[in-house]
Image (tube, rainbow, N blue to C red):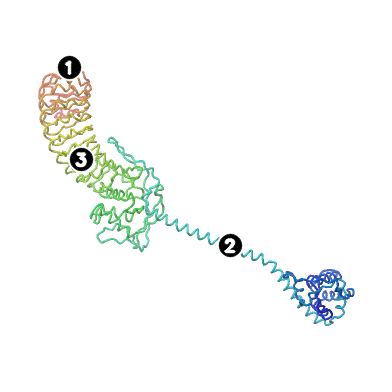
Amino acid sequence: LERAHGVSKASLTRMLTTERSRVPNVAFESDRFRQQSNHVRRGNGGPRQPSLSNAMAARKSVRNLPPAKPPNTSRAIVVADSPKPNSASQIIGNMIPASMKKIVPTTEGNNDRMNAITEEEDDDSDEEFSRYRAAERSTRKLATLDSERAGGTDSLKEDDDGALCRKLLWLWLLLLGLALLVGGFVLTIFLRGGGDRADGLTGKGKNLSPNDDSDHKPTFSPTKLRIRTEKSDDELEENDSLTQPQTEAPNGGSIQVFETGSKLPASSQQSNKRYSSNTARNEDIKQHVVLISGDVALQDSPQNKAMMWIMNEDTLQLETKSRNFVQRYALMAVYHSLNGPYWENNEGYGGDGHECTWHGVACSSSFEVTSLSLKNNTLTGTLPNELLEFTSLTSIDLSSNMLFGTIPEDISRLGVLEFLFLNNNHLHGTIPTRIVSVSTLKTLHLSENNLKGSIPESIHNLQGLENLWIVDNELTGEIPISIGSLRNLKKLELSGNSLSGTIPVTLSWLINLVTLNLSGNKLTGPLPEKLWSLTQLRELWLSYNSLEGELSTQIGGMVNLLVLGLDHNNLSGTLPWDIGRMEMLKLIMISGNDLYGGVPMSLCSIRFELFAADCKKVACSCCTICGDDIPEMERSGEKVPDV
């Protein structure tokens, strides 16, 4: 009130005291003081300035008010209890005793009383000044209280909003932490079982056909590895019997392997991933490898090198339960057993790519190895038993290398094998008898080795066999009679061995036979009469044996024959006239026998590429070379036709 109307609280206090003494039990409501203050301000000419002179001017204005009339109690109204004050005026009203809050005089009575109040005044200016200052401080406190009460609700709302925001922030942080924890756990599980996802591979399998000589090229070059040394509390603790690979750093720390951009699916693409040693995992791998390879894996051996690579250097860090763990280990065992670092092409082996991308390896759509083609690749060593771990393998081509040792006896474990090419090596021993248990076998190529023994009698179990090549070995014994039951056989080549006995008549049962080569053996006896009934035959090689007897008149039944090699035997008699029916003949060799007579004119009507006969015994006007002249040609250095 003092700030708004320029009236000193001290003056108001004195007026209240005087009024209480004159009119007991009468209260002046705050509106009455507000009206009086407005009157004073109008007389003062404006708002009060915060100075003592203004306060004194306000008191003088109060003295000049019209004299107050006696209060008219008949016009009084009953004042009810006011609500909780929310302004300074109501607070001043509450300061009036309750006994004075019963009757409020009307305006005329109030003016009379104000005139009476202004007659008494204290002239002590010093006391007035001190009271004025006290009233000023009290009014400021009341104004502050009003503003605090007015703004209390807003502050409470702001506090509530702030608390809600803090709660939402903590909840969001909690959910984010939980998501990171779950994501890390899932990523760890994914990396531990990485062998099951070799993601990014197209995965279409490719089987080799018997005539497929193309090399399998990997889809991409394996990425290089980079390593760094770092101290590790989990360094691998192996038994003393294990041969440790070179995986120790100069400072004593363990070497951690990092991936640098594998092109696998996704798998399987990982970069800069650190793989620390895990003793429990390595123990599990060691036990699993011993079950596969035996105790040789615990010695200084190719199997041990493959195992240590799987443990410490392989970036996939497979567990033994991974689907491709066995085939990955087996391929590395083959690599180390056959001098892999010196192969002509060893791309991918020992790298961080999936094994299906390694040189010579082909896989099915489920990433199982189905073909291994490493022909003419400078492989050296013996065939490891780990080769038999590829249970889905349908084709093996290790031809034209420097393999020695024997063919694994348990090769029957390759239950779906169709093509086996081991020709042109240095293998010795015998043909495994269990090989006849691979009923799916279609091509068996064992030529140009040092195999001994005889052809297994149970070879008739290979009912799906189409091509049998065992040329230039040291086989002995007779040709099994049961071989005639291989009705799907198309090519049978057993030349360059020491097979004896007669030609089985059961060979005439091979109605699909296209090539029959038995030359260069020790076969005796006459030619079977029914042999000439093989109308599908294109090539017949019986040279360099001890066959005897005369040529049958049924020889003309081989109307599709292209090559007839009967030279260097003990055949006798004359050439039958039916031989002229072989109109497709290109090569005919009958020299080195006891044949005589002339060549039928129908035979000379055929345009030959080579016709060799003993010209001194056989009158041959259409022969391209005389067989009895060959020794003289060789002595004179003249070129002899290469049959």
Task: Kindly report which numbered mark, 1 or 2, lies closer to the viewer in this rendering.
Answer: 2
Judge left or right: residue 502 versus residue 309. Answer: left
Regarding mark 1 in the picture, which secondary structure is present there? helix
Question: Hey, which residue is sitting farthest top in the picture?
Answer: 601
Mark closest to the chain's N terminus, 2 or 3? 2
Say which mark, if any, is on residue 601: 1
Q: On the image, which quarter does residue 511 sit in?
A: top left
Tell me the crowding category of disc 2: few under 14, some 14 to 19, or many 20 or more residues within 10 angstroms, Cα based.
Answer: few
Residue pointed to by mark 2: 164
Residue drawn 17% across and 43% down? 428
Which one is closest to the eye, mark 2 or mark 3? 2
Q: Position of residue 297 (x, y in %)?
A: 25, 54
Q: Is residue 368 left or right of residue 458?
A: right
Q: Residue at x 47, y 57 (%)?
A: 179
Q: For this rendering, which residue is in front, 85 or 592?
A: 85
Q: Which residue matches tag 3?
A: 436
- Structural distance between the alpha carbons of marks 2 and 3: 81 Å
**In which quarter of the view is residue 604 placed?**
top left
The one of 249 and 154 positioned closer to us in this rendering: 154
Precedes in sequence: disc 3 or disc 1: 3
Residue type indicated by callout 3: Val
Callout count: 3
Q: Amino acid at mark 1?
A: Met
Residue at 31% across / 46% down in the picture?
A: 346
Mark 1 touches mark 2? (CB < 8 Å): no
